[in-house]
Amino acid sequence: MLDESNKTYPPTEAFTAQAHADKETYDRMYAQSIEDPDGFWAEHAKRIDWIKPFSKVRNVNFDHGDVSIKWFEDGTLNASVNCVDRHLADRGDQTAIIWEPDDPADEAQHITYKQLHAHVGKMANVLKEMGVKRGDRVVLYLPMIPQAAYAMLACARIGAIHSVVFAGFSPDALAARVNGCEAKVVITSDGAPRGGRTTNLKDNVNKALLHCDDDVKTLVVRRTGQQVAWHENDYWLHEMEEKVSDQCEPEEMNAEDPLFVLYTSGSTGKPKGVVHTTGGYLVFTSITHQYTFDYHDGDVFWCTADVGWVTGHSYIVYGPLANGATTLMFEGVPTWPDAGRCWQVCQDHKVNQFYTAPTAIRALMGKGNEHVEKYDLSSLKVLGTVGEPINPEAWTWYNEVVGKENCPIVDTWWQTETGGHLLTPLPGAIPTKPGSATLPFFGVKPVVLEPESGKVIEETECEGVLCLADSWPGQMRTVYGDHQRFMDTYFQQYKGYYFSGDGCRRDKDGYYWITGRVDDVINVSGHRMGTAEVESALVAHEAVSEAAVVGYPHPVKGQGIYAYVTLMRGTEPSEDLRKELETWVRKEIGPIAKPDLIQWAPGLPKTRSGKIMRRILRKIAENDYDSLGDTSTLAEPEVVDDLIENRRNRG
Ligand code: 6R9
């Protein structure tokens, strides 16, 4: 592996000269944000239009049992007004959204702020017409089409809470989320083209709704024109839109009213509904979008994430649109029709900031430089990465081949729970090091704790678990319908701190290096997967008696899914059964959860109290047999030898 850990890459003088922040500005603003958080955030909350100004900036308690997080609590605002209406006067005819369809032969669309306003107004009125009221939940299960952004903003406009479900999730996973937040309406499309193939989304919704309340209505966007099975509670968006006006009076929302729920994997089987509220989230996504990407008026910003993930929420929709940016939305995949697709889009639309995940960078790096070199990438100014640690090889390729050593790379560490960037370089201010998310954003107080004792480590150079000592405006407020779970997950283990679930190292310069999850969450292609979710899908199959899932290093995905499976007595392992289990998990959760490797395990290593020793399974999956640690406390130490022998046989 390349050792780049001591190399630093300072921004060029020319870049720094035009940037929002140089090192001195960063130091000054960071210091102020820590010494006087109330003053700092009162000042920066002015970037948002308030209907009624707030008088109190923060009201935060991190004590387990009594956790409560409030920002700008007596202020009122509307998120859709901030993302749309307030730009009409100055930039009504500027493009708000560039939509690049899956097939490069189809033409891109440019939607101006004026048009966005009309689309959002119509969709908001359609939702009202369907009976959606302030506080109701609406699930979005959509391809990457502009209607996804319209729908989010339409919900925000009428005070409904959206919950976007990634369109790659299975009908079962969708049903669990519709039921979890008791949604009134599901918004979907007939089909979803992606990488030249089409998924029948409406069909998935039909299957999901068999497990949901009969009253749930479906609003369908016509994307492909394909045939769909129709039910009595189904409505076509284009038909509904004919009946309503495009003017919709926005609801006056409290800063702490929920804006959305987004389900994410945790270390137990059931996904958590992460709740974000309106005021703090909008302030935080807007300020991070501006400073982290050094976004300037007129820039074209492209985040390649799907709106089904938090990255799409914060950096395709809310952050950029709150800043009056031109945000690019891409329906396709980076490798279809070929590995030049992203660079062609960058060239065609003169993209200035490009934000993607290490897994995409690695996949494209593997296809050869010629796909990049064919295109004119001179518009690029800043490159971003998110989702998992980036390996130095991929970082260097991104820097040299894509950025021509002329674009700072911002490695942004954050989570669904944090709403926006917590650790990241500001591109004009902070010299970068490949693989490090560098330093905290304004107002962010990272601490490294000893994992066992929970003691805060004071030395600069150290390694431990990453916690946050104080709140920031974009922090999640609760788990939907389960505040106890929120407190237990994030505030119980280390008293008085928010526990991120990540391990990290801090180097002599105070830079943070994320070492990965310390809980039972694995990170597959930048997507979070709870090992327990995959395990419960596996044991739901009649042939499986027990399953244990761990992550292992994967050259493109970062981590792959390694499943140890014990079969029911009398069931013989076979290649057919292996395929069947793979298909089964795909169906139960979705394609992203398909195990990369299934190993038949006659027995699993357990403690005498019956706990599966994942530490050992992880080592075996990594082919690292010399550091298995103490196995003598196992109920049946000999199962380990069996597993090792099986692992060796598969090479
Ligand atoms: C935004 C997002 C969060 C988990 C997080 C960590 C990993 C994200 C990272 C990173 C290293 C980075 N992660 N960004 N690890 N360097 N720059 O990805 O949210 O899907 O909730 O995942 O992803 O492990 O805890 P989410």
Image (cartoon, helix red, strand yellow):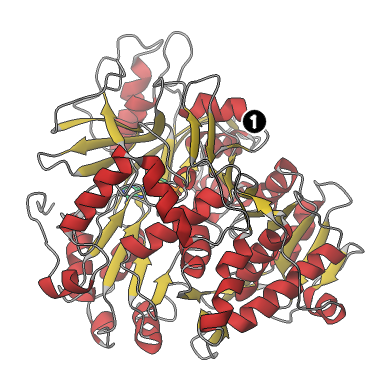
Relative to 191, is 491 on the left or the right? left
Looking at the image, is 612 positioned above or below residue 189? above
On-image quarter of the C terminus: top left
Q: Secondary structure at mark 1?
A: loop
Q: Percent x, y for residue 473?
A: 46, 45
- Seen from the viewer's position, the closer of residues 227 and 467 is 467
Relative to 396, is 537 on the left or the right? right
Residue that lies at the very extreme toward the left in this rendered image: 6
- Report the residue marked by disc 1: 482
Looking at the image, is 549 positioned above or below residue 256? above
Image mark count: 1
Q: Percent x, y for residue 529?
A: 48, 43
Cβ of mark 1 under 8 Å from ligand 1: the answer is no
Q: Residue at x 89, y 64 (%)?
A: 231
- Seen from the viewer's position, the closer of residues 474 and 640 is 474
Residue 562 appearing in the image: no
Q: Residue at x 79, y 59 (%)?
A: 206
Q: Percent x, y for residue 66?
A: 55, 21
Callout 1 crowding tier (Cα within 10 Å): few <14, some 14–19, many ≥20? few
Question: In the rendered structure, which amino acid carries the disc numbered 1?
Answer: Asp
Q: Percent x, y for residue 222?
A: 73, 78
- Seen from the viewer's position, the closer of residues 80 and 170 is 80
Relative to 335, is 13 on the left or the right? left
Residue 192 appearing in the image: yes
Q: Residue at x 30, y 67 (%)?
A: 294
